[in-house]
Image (tube, rainbow, N blue to C red):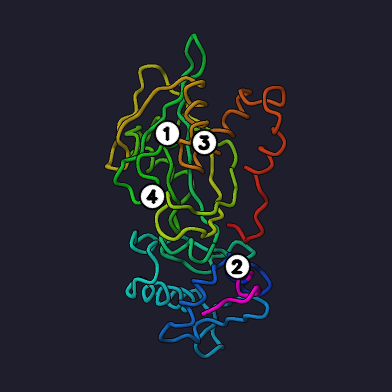
Amino acid sequence: MTKSNLDLVNEGTYYSFKHGDHTLGYVLPSVINSLECLPVPSTWQIDHDTRIIRLIDQDESVDTLEIRNMAIAATVMNLKETDSFKVLRGWRDELYPVYAPKGELLFNIERSASPLFGVLTYGVHMTAFVRTDTGLKIWVPRRAKKKQTYGGMLDNTVAGGMATGEPIFESLVREAGEEASFSEAMVRENAKACGVVTYFYVRDERAGGEVGLLQPECQYIYDLEVGQDVTPKPGDDEVEEFYLWTVEEVQAALRHGEFKPNCALVLLDFFIRHGILTPQNEKNYIEIVARIHRRLDFPTA
């Protein structure tokens, strides 16, 4: 089959996933093709002229959270059972929320399926650091090599996605215990909220699954200053070990691409807030600040 010039352009053009007038995400043409092959394709309204898709109800008269959840779940389960996308082989049995414009929950979606629909997801990231006579040192974990995504890469001290219904700080406390064996009391008393990092990531082969899926994310950022007597320890099988590194060692690892991409952004934000990265030593300072605090045109919680 030969392709026209327009076919070539269309292959690189995303579809907008909309609810009402609001965009929820961006979807690859390959995903659209799979949606059109579903046993009940009327679950989706697909307009190829405007390149817009919408989730619709079977009777087109009821629009409830329960029905939307059922439609999304049926779609994603069918894609999983037909092995339509490699990204679904990393099925997590964890639901991520997607919100409507006023912050109300629109529907839930299986975590591993969220990149297929390009919807905004949320997480918590915390940097634990120590003040020493020679300057700041940062606790850096290495992800387990067997992890489905970014195996063996460096990470933030504590990091994880936020499931539906889990409060932000409670998610942080849970992740801190699971990943770094930090006590609940220490985290509750000493973790400091430091804003958010927002960005648009295009998934590559390191993420596992299909390449090119769009993944907008919002990470709630925390700092945790700890004493020299505190040592994080892996609390689950997701982390291999922790290193206590100087700022210069962390910067060297960043330059060599050793960090998971979004964790690199969180560390840049940390360096900016702590006066390590400044307009005097970084010529692209304004662009960096803007791009790690990107305005995302999606409804948020």
Q: Name the residue under label 1.
A: 157
Question: Which residue occupies the extreme front position in the image?
Answer: 2
Which residue: 62% across, 81% down?
Answer: 47
Residue 2 inside the magenta-drawn segment: yes
Give the mark, 3 or 1, whose residue is nearer the N terminus. 1
Residue of label 4: 149
Count the labels in the image. 4
How far apart in space, not on screen, are marks 1 and 2 (Cα)? 34 Å
State the separation of the CA atoms marked 3 and 4.
23 Å
Figure check: 296 above or below 237: below
Identify the amino acid type marked 2.
Tyr
For label 2, the residue is: 14
Decide which of tag 3 and tag 4 comes sooner along the chain: 4
Q: How far apart are marks 3 and 2 (CA)?
A: 34 Å
Q: Residues within 10 Å of mark 4 (few under 14, many from 20)?
A: some
Q: Position of residue 216 (x, y in %)?
A: 56, 55
Q: Position of residue 238 (x, y in %)?
A: 31, 42
Q: Is residue 68 magenta-colored? A: no
Q: Nearer the viewer, residue 199 or 194?
A: 199
For the point 51% across and 52% down, which residue is it?
Answer: 122
* Residue behind mark 3: 222
Mark before the other along the chain sequence, 3 or 2: 2
Q: What residue type is labelled 1?
A: Thr
